Image (cartoon, rainbow, N blue to C red):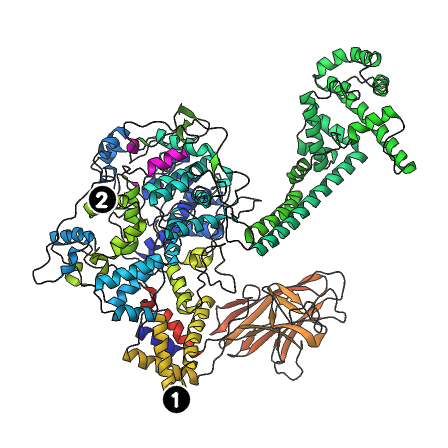
Amino acid sequence: MPRFLIAWILAVGTVASVSAAGLSPQEKFFEREVRPLLIERCHECHGDSLQESDLRLDSLEAVLQGGISGPAAIAGNVDESLLLRAVLGKGVEQMPPDEPLEAEQIAVLRRWIRMGMPWTPKNDATDRSGMKPEIALGDQEAIGRAAKNHWAFQPVADVAPPTPVPPPDGTFASWGRNPIDAFIWRKLQQHRLHPSRPADRATLLRRLSFDIVGLPPTADEIDYFREDSRPDSVVVAEAIERLLASEHYGERWARYWLDVARYADTRDWQAQADLRYPFAYTYRDYVIRSLNDDKPYDQFIREQIAADFFTDDPDAPELAALGFLTVGPRFRNNRLEQAADKIDVVCRGVMGLTVACARCHDHKYDPVPIEDYYSLYGVFASSEIPDKLPQLRDDQFDRKLRAEFQQALSAKKQELADYQQQLRREAVETLTSDLPIYLEGFYRLSVAKSQQVRGVIDKLELSETAITPLDRTLSRRLRDRSDQTHPVLGPWQQALSVDEKVFKKSIDRWLREWQSGDQVLPIVAQHLSADAPDSRHALVQSYAKLFEQALSAWQEWKQEQPNGQRLPDDQLEQVRQVLMAEDGGWFDLDVDEVTAASRLFGKGRKILGDFEKAITEVKANHPGSPPRAMVIEDAEQIVNPFVLLRGEPNRRGDRVPRQFPAILAGDDRAPFVDGSGRRELAEAMTAPDNPLTSRVIVNRVWARYFGRGLATSLDDFGLRSDPPTHPELLDFLASQFVENGWSLKWLHRMITTSQTYAQSSQMRQPAFAADPENQWFWRQNRRRLDFEAMRDSMLAVSGQLDPQLGGRSVHLSEQPFTRRRTVYAYVDRVEMDPILRTFDFASPTSSAASRAETTIPQQALFSMNHPFVAQMARGIAEQVAAAERSLPGDQVSQGETGATSRQVIGLYRQVFGRQPSATEQQLAEAYLRQAASEPQSVNQTWSYGWGAAASDDGTDPTLHPLPFWTGKAYQPSEAFPDPVHRHARLTAAGGHPGIDEQHAVIRRWRAPADGIVRVTGSLRHSRENGDGVTAVVRHQSQDKRFHAQNREIKTVVPPIQVQKGQVIDLAVAPGPTTTADAFIWQAVILGIGGDLAGQRWESQQDFGPPPPPPLEPLAQLAQALLLTNEFLFVD
């Protein structure tokens, strides 16, 4: 970015940068790096709920106290800290046991211990309830007494607003119109404060627009709003109604709820599993639709917990609401963890009650005994996610797209079915040719039971797809005794249904009976009598010989009579039919069992997984795929749960009924009786007399408008929470919210039409001195745009916002960049998009009612360097230029100066919705004039092309670009091989040269400064065919050659002195023949002197797509405006 532009940014508006107030650098490191790591990887087993080995890692005191092995860490002493030794696996058990920490994570812990283990304690609130913590910790009787007086557990009071008494001079006369203002006014008076003046109309409209729809108003909307001559109350109310009626309202406020619902488009990590939730988007769209429709909040909650109880329609759109329970993590299918997650999102997410903390013991601070946790556990343990998700009614689907989807899906399913049938055919062929050894495998597995299936397969070298289904078929028939009277298999059934001792005692008698009777086929009786098996193993071997005889006869007969259907020997045909009968023969293998058997080993799992992923891919991404609801339903077996002592599955306590927590249910609590109890749970949560549900949502909505809640905690209303600053106002809004049909839009209107909301955010020093936290709301709080609003605003002001509502999730970082709103971003639990991580996006691992707000360098770098921002800046500039071109002729006669002036005005109106000031106009015009006279260039260290491998005259050979970028490689054209250059291409690791030494592929490095560099690396050619490749490191007249043929060699050259702008070419040419010339060359250029000392460039790491063309001056100016506080803050 040009220096003049940077200076201009500093002159016009400061780039947003807010430091974490009051924290030392060490404490910031702890908050940003250490605490999240401990929470994510350690607290599950060493936190509030569970303390394996008596160790907790959720406070500094607990770390220093340690567990049964002593202190977990010693400040400053890395070597003696058990915590570090455990994560390294040195001398103690590796922790975490399943997934060891990455090297970077271990480095964080090492650095933290070395710096003295700084820790920023959470506010100690254990005594806010009036209890003595050392007495009440976990004492449910004492906690229960304290809870009776706790504000959050009191019934919501129907409070009448006070009558404000404004000053007699008419100042603040409008503060008597909205009940909110009356409550705020009274508190201000009590603290000898007065409110701020109203914000100007332009500021207020911008605030309303961002708060309600998450998008900035246009310049025309601001002009109309500012110039409207009607009273403020009328104009503001009209704007609020317009914004609430916008579909963008649901998109804005849905994102807040999706944080609570820990929404993601994938499950958490599990080996060999498809992690995607292809239909998670239907839940997100349900939330958006419900908010736009102003669905009553109590109904909104009931549907998300028990929609299946409230509709009999199998394809009702409301079923998508159940995604609230199912879009969370799956914890590797651990049902205990899944239930805990659902309890947390339901109780803390909706009611602000941390019931999940009572999983292993009575809650330490709140009136939640362990029995209440397991009562709710029973509800969710009695619910399950079905294998097949119901298709939702979709009245607006595209018939052509739906037909294309069905065709694509059928094709992929047929590919899988063909593969399964191939597996079955191969298994039958294997059994036909090698039946005796497979019957030996069956004997070991299911008769002698001497080996497990993997051991049998390994020892006898069997096919898993043949032995496993055969063993299941034969074992099932033995259990069912279905062959007891079968003329061929009667003896088999009789002999293998007893143990070895009974067999030996009975076999002689059986042989006589089989010979003399008429139930056993004579050929079978004679064969067994001749073999006289003295053990069950011998009997199996005897049958194997008989079956082989029948199979051999059949093969001979088919050669003589290709169309023959039966053997001429009727008895031998009956033996053959045991194996080959189309319905019920031993070789009539169940295709599903064969398929399941193919998963036994990794190769088979991989092949099958690829077919299944292809089917999922069509379902997930095809635009014609019908939407499906991520439902949950009652299990066939309803669970009457036991308390699990210390949360351990094998330590059962008393059985408890499924029911609502006692602190909320009252004395007339009754067990749930309707199936799992989800319906009764949902109704109890939304009952008008529930003191938590309405208070929690009102408090959260208030916090979104003011930057803080009336009660500071947004997801914990337990005994440790601060009391609300305005308890009467909170109860007034909660009671009226319920009274007005649980209407969220009513609540939005009530808040946004208040004078409290409309106040200016300007600082007043006397008021700030009296109330620095603004807890009495003497002004509006200045708030920074969250990432969603920032990105969406860039799309809006650039004219590139796609207004489409709903649909599948999109990847934000994929190019070309999606133009959809950020609420539709694909959220990956395992690999979160780096942009989302950079901007404080809520972690989808658990319910989040609020987000941390950080300011880190990566955020500023995104605005300055990210190609998305550059694309938005170009869009803004193009809109301004297009407006200039569309002007009538009489308005463009002022020449270049007039055009520049109009462009600056257009730019400010486009980005800020206002005219520039005289100073801003002057600075911007000066920048555009100066930038127009400066040449535009791309500062590119690496470039990629083809040319001669060597230079005869010491000059740099012409580098012809490889212009086509595939996403992974540079090549001459989209066609590969190219008609002229054939296989020439460059990739991150290496590439392939062209047709001769004049068509070598070249990486060109350009020196950014004067200095000395050393070039090292390794060149590998791994083909036996061909005559190898030649690598050339060239600088001016100097070059060094290396030849590799089916081997790896080091490529090291003496130090090279370069001047700024000079180049070093890394060229690779073919030998005389041009086949088998693929190579890998990982080169490193290391600065060892001059201005380049200490710098490093790596050919593989630095490899990437071509840089975007430089921004034109007008687009650069647009980008500068996007970096200012005026754009990045609400006010």
Residue at point 49% right, 61% down? 813
What residue is shown with label 2?
731
Between residues 521 and 744, which one lies in front from this camera angle? Answer: 744
Q: Is residue 185 above or below residue 316?
A: below
Q: Secondary structure at mark 1?
A: helix
Q: Which residues are magenta?
A: 663-692
What residue is shown with label 1?
895
Residue 18 location, x and y as percent?
31, 62
Between residues 137 and 611, which one lies in front from this camera angle? Answer: 611
| Crowd class of label 2 (few under 14; some 14 to 19; many from 20; radius 10 Å) | many
| Residue 443 in sight from this viewpoint | yes
Residue 537 location, x and y as percent?
76, 22
Q: How far is the residue under mark 1 from the one under mark 2?
A: 64 Å
Q: State if disc 2 and disc 1 touch (CB < 8 Å).
A: no
Q: Is residue 906 above or below residue 249?
A: below
Residue 888 location, x and y as percent?
40, 84
Residue at the left extreme, as displayed = 168
- 934 sits left or right of 728 in the view: right
- 291 sits left or right of 1093 in the view: left
